[in-house]
Amino acid sequence: MDFSAPFLTNYWPHLLAAFIGYFTIKFLARSLFGIEITRRFSHEYDPARQLDLERDEDENQGVSGGPQSFEDMTEHIPYRLKKYTEKETFRRAVEFYRMMDERRTVRHFSDDAVPLGVVQTLIKTAGTSPSGAHTQPWTYVVVQDFNLKCQIRKIVEEEEEINYRKRMSATWVKDLEKLRTTWERNVLDVAPYLIMVFKQAYGVGPNGERINHYYSEISISISVGILLAAIQNAGLVTVTSTPLNAGPALRTLLARPVNEKLLLLLPIGYPAHNATVPDLQRRDIKDNHGSDVM
Ligand SMILES: Cc1cc2nc3c(=O)[nH]c(=O)nc-3n(C[C@H](O)[C@H](O)[C@H](O)COP(=O)(O)O)c2cc1C
């Protein structure tokens, strides 16, 4: 197109109309609908905005702090991992699968002792988990004291009874029938330890400053997945449980700080000698669309 003088002379009324039109629409969009028209096109990737969109709704409320600077950039060091032969890789994958396939949620515990060092090592293993921006937003609290375990049981059972009788739908109660669970939680004072998993909504720095945590619940779920694998590997059992509505009372009982919210309660120990589990079948890999190789 020729933008020389004749073009401008001929088409200036059109250009002026387009110019006025653009700014009128921009003004109306902002004042009437709160829409900001900027030169940033929607396909442009803005990491800060993306993070905002993906952030847990209840995370980072009232948290201050801007983007991290690179001034404190961590040194990067070489990473080497032993490379197995293809045969050995396959053997290890199958062996690990077989071990994990034996994992079951066990609701009948023995009170046989487990060394505290074992539990601490399992939690250390859980701490190897990846986490959003390496914020490690979890707190693992281990309860061993019998009286405390009894108090935890009382709080959980009181809430569970209300859940079963009133709060939850008839469908929820029916869906759980196959597991034969009730509001009773006798494992809670039989198991040698209870691991209480708290989410840190935000971290607290050395000078009391708040530190943003990102993707906390996803990070904690991954960490607990690693914990479950470690528990299985050690020959111990657990019940993955989410103590519905009991979180605030348990947080108070355990004197946890305000930035922590209880997510999971995992009793840990050996199965009772007469323990049973529901005969559940796992989905075959062929039925699992997520496992399709494309
Ligand atoms: C997030 C989550 C919450 C769970 N909550 C409970 C619970 O409150 N009580 C319980 O007995 N089992 C609970 N379970 C265990 C499931 O019922 C169990 O994993 C499922 O029935 C499959 O059995 P399996 O673990 O033996 O393969 C929970 C599991 C998950 C992952």
Image (cartoon, helix red, strand yellow):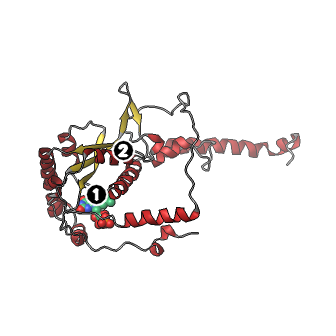
Q: Which residue sits at x=43%, y=40%?
A: 135
Q: Position of residue 160 (x, y in %)?
A: 17, 58
- Queried on whether the Cβ of the residue with tag 2 lies below 8 angstroms from ligand 1, the answer reads no
- Queried on whether the Cβ of the residue with tag 1 lies below 8 angstroms from ligand 1, the answer reads no
Q: Position of residue 105 (x, y in %)?
A: 28, 63
Residue 234 sits above or below residue 284 on the image: above
Q: Position of residue 29 (x, y in %)?
A: 54, 45
Q: Nearer the viewer, residue 146 or 158?
A: 146
Q: Secondary structure at mark 2?
A: helix
Mark 1 is on which residue type? Leu
Can residue 197 be seen from the camera position used here? Answer: no
Label 2 or label 1, whichever comes before in sequence order: 2
Q: Which mark is residue 236?
A: 1
Q: Which residue sits at x=18%, y=68%?
A: 274
Look at mark 2 in the image and give the residue it sits on: 124
Residue 210 sits above or below residue 229 on the image: above
Residue 80 sits above or below residue 173 on the image: above
Q: Nearer the viewer, residue 208 or 13?
A: 208
Q: Which residue sits at x=25%, y=72%?
A: 278
Q: Dot 2: within a 10 Å radius of its alpha carbon, few (fewer than 14), some, or many (20 or more) residues? A: some
Q: Dot 1: within a 10 Å radius of its alpha carbon, few (fewer than 14), some, or many (20 or more) residues? A: some
Q: Quadrant of ligand 1?
A: bottom left
Can residue 101 be seen from the camera position used here? Answer: yes
Count all numbered tags in the image, as a single digit. 2
Mark 2 is on which residue type? Lys
Locate residue 199 relative to residue 165 in the image: left or right: right
Q: Position of residue 94 (x, y in %)?
A: 46, 66
Locate residue 185 relative to residue 27 in the image: left or right: left
Whole-angstrom CA distance, mark 2 to mark 1, is: 16 Å
Q: Which mark is residue 170?
A: none
Quarter of the rendering occupied by the C terminus: bottom right
Q: Secondary structure at mark 1?
A: loop
